[in-house]
């Protein structure tokens, strides 16, 4: 129980509607977690993994209709449709009360309603926020314990009079026809029913940390971003911190946990992981922008993760991890496409059937404590956060964007983030090369009008002045005339981070182009990297005609926002057109 009267009253009100068999207040203790795990193993919610090879690890298999975020059933319930903006599904608060709220009536009958207090951010941080999730899913409780600082730490932070984000979740009957995820930015509240999948049910994840925290940051003067946080340590032992935003399938987690190539590693270069997914950024007392990771764990996509692509992630999931919808070997070890040893013939797929492929669901996941990652930063729990010197935006472009370039100023950097995009692959949509705009990688997660969101970014830059981070754009996915990737990626991306560090420090050779500052041919350290003749020139080339076509796509995209588009964004587009025309 809590001394917070507002919390106690709300829990009682929800219980009277959902009618659970019992109410359990979670303390986040080891003993509580053990009892929950044992209960879920007993009723089949979890399967025990090989405890000698994967101690403390378990497998959960979702209902086959409930395996991913349901964007078309995810709503922003703001006062007006224009406040939600053209990139969000909108539902009025009145409609939510008549259409969604009745689904919670008696939804928890025969179940336990767990009261899950959780802290987003380090204990003792002035930037951390408290959420309370009421859920009838013990699987959610076990995952929230990994993903957040759950239990006593949250209640201590909340105190008797503190405020909190209300989150109500029920599995309901798991029917897609009765599945809704509703966000109320003004009330700081979330309703989720009909899904047990992490992105829909772990309400501290994208729901609170981005869709609700975004409007909070706008109102309070900070940023809630879909960004990794890394620390780049140079051979002198100085660590420089950077945030980076990438759409899905662009190597975000791999960059957050990057292991430098051998030639750099031997000289003392290191990358430290502060966060792999979400960054909350505030201006500190010294006028610099600081970032905290509001999460305590990783909720990572399993397929494609391997000892080759991300050895740090593979090390992190070796114990105390909940796997969801992965395949298993005969001896109950997790396995998935892209993982070493995947060709083993006797594999049980994610639905419990004998394999043939796909063995793991394409969106199968692991939930692992961040502190189990070998590259986790010693600043992970720093209440102040870490000072951010560079912000990186990235996308998947075959021809247009060069390997890396720097914005001309903060407003131009916001323009780079606002216009970032990726090209679809046949595997994703059946169409190749279709440009999908995903501003700041926030398209599914921005809890208010994106035009206003860009306006908030512009104000944050004005506030930072000369101390604001430098802004860059990267593209690991440029292709040659034979459609082959030009850049090796993975650990070699440290070479690009090194150039970014040089630019932050006022060094690093570059040439001014119509789109920003691009490295000179020798600006990227390629020592020991076997690239063909002329490859760096191809990676850094600017095709004016391709960029002119790009401006037409940007103009069309900006047109969706009407009067909510900041004038500075229109001005940046016009300036780009003029520079390209010269």
Image (spheres, grey):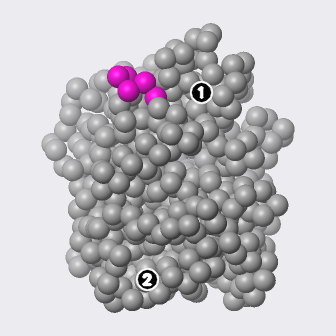
Which of these two is toward me, 492 or 46? 46
Residue at image location 68% in from the left, 32% down from the top? 351
- Classify 10 Å Cα crowding around label 1: few (below 14), some (14-19), many (20 and above): many
Q: Where in the figure is residue 331, as x and y percent of width and height? A: 49, 17
Mark 2 nearby-residue class (10 Å; few <14, some 14–19, many ≥20): many
Q: Nearer the viewer, residue 97 or 109?
A: 109
Q: Which residues are magenta?
A: 49-53
Horizontal side, residue 164 vs residue 431: left or right: left
Q: Are marks 1 and 2 in contact (CB under 8 Å)?
A: no
Magenta part, dominant SS:
loop
Secondary structure found at label 1? strand
Q: Quadrant of residue 290?
A: bottom left
Q: Residue furthest top?
A: 345
Q: Quadrant of the N terminus?
A: bottom left
Residue 298 in picture, x, y percent from top left: 44, 47
**Compared to 510, does 78 lie above or below?**
below
Q: Is residue 52 magenta?
A: yes
Circle 1 sits on which residue?
327
Residue at position x 66%, y 36% from top?
Answer: 362
| Residue 297 picture location, percent across and down | 40, 50
Task: Point out the image quarter for the C terminus.
Answer: bottom right
Q: Quadrant of residue 296?
A: bottom left
Residue visible at 59% across and 81% down in the picture: 16
């Amino acid at each position: 129980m809590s001394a917070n009267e507002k919390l106690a009253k709300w829990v009682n009100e929800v219980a009277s509607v959902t009618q659970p068999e019992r109410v359990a207040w979670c303390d986040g203790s080891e003993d509580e977690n053990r009892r929950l795990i044992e209960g879920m193993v007993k009723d089949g919610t979890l399967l025990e993994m090989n405890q000698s090879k994967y101690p403390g690890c378990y497998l959960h298999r979702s209902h086959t209709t409930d395996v991913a975020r349901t964007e078309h059933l995810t709503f922003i319930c703001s006062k007006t449709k224009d406040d939600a903006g053209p990139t969000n599904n909108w539902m009025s608060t009145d409609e939510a009360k008549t259409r969604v709220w009745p689904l919670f009536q008696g939804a928890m009958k025969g179940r336990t309603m767990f009261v899950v207090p959780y802290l987003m951010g380090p204990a003792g941080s002035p930037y951390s926020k408290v959420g309370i999730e009421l859920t009838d899913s013990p699987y959610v409780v076990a995952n929230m314990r990994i993903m957040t600082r759950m239990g006593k730490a949250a209640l201590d932070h909340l105190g008797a009079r503190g405020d909190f984000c209300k989150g109500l979740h029920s599995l309901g009957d798991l029917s897609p026809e009765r599945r809704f995820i509703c966000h109320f930015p003004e009330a700081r509240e979330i309703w989720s029913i009909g899904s047990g999948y992490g992105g829909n049910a772990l309400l501290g994840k994208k729901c609170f940390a981005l869709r609700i925290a975004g409007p909070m940051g706008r109102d309070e003067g900070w940023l809630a971003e879909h960004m990794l946080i890394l620390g780049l340590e140079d051979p002198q032992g100085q660590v420089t911190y950077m945030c980076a935003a990438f759409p899905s399938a662009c190597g975000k987690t791999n960059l957050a946990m990057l292991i430098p190539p051998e030639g750099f590693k031997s000289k003392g270069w290191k990358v430290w992981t502060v966060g792999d997914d979400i960054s909350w950024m505030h201006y500190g007392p010294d006028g610099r922008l600081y970032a905290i990771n509001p999460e305590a764990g990783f909720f990572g996509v399993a397929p494609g993760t391997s000892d080759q692509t991300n050895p740090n992630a593979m090390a992190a999931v070796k114990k105390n991890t909940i796997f969801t919808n992965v395949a298993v070997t005969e001896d109950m070890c997790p396995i998935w496409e892209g993982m070493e040893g995947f060709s083993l013939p006797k594999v049980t797929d994610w639905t419990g059937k004998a394999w043939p492929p796909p063995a793991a669901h394409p969106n199968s996941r692991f939930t692992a404590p961040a502190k189990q990652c070998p590259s986790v930063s010693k600043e992970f729990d720093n209440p102040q956060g870490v000072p951010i010197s560079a912000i990186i935006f990235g996308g998947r472009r075959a021809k247009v964007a060069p390997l890396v370039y720097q914005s001309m100023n903060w407003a131009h950097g916001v323009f780079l983030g606002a216009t970032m995009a990726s090209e679809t692959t046949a595997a994703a949509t059946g169409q190749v090369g279709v440009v999908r705009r995903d501003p700041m990688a926030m398209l599914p997660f921005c809890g208010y009008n994106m035009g206003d969101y860009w306006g908030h970014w512009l104000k944050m830059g004005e506030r930072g002045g000369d101390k604001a981070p430098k802004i860059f754009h990267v593209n690991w996915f440029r292709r040659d005339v034979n459609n082959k990737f030009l850049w090796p990626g993975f650990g070699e991306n440290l070479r690009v981070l090194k150039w970014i560090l040089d630019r932050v420090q006022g060094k690093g050779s570059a040439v001014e182009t119509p789109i920003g500052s691009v490295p000179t041919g020798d600006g990227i350290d390629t020592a020991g990297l076997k690239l063909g003749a002329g490859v760096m020139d191809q990676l850094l080339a600017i095709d004016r005609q391709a960029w002119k076509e790009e401006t037409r796509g940007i103009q069309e995209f900006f047109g969706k926002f009407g009067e909510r588009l900041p004038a500075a964004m229109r001005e940046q587009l016009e300036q780009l057109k003029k520079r390209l025309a010269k």
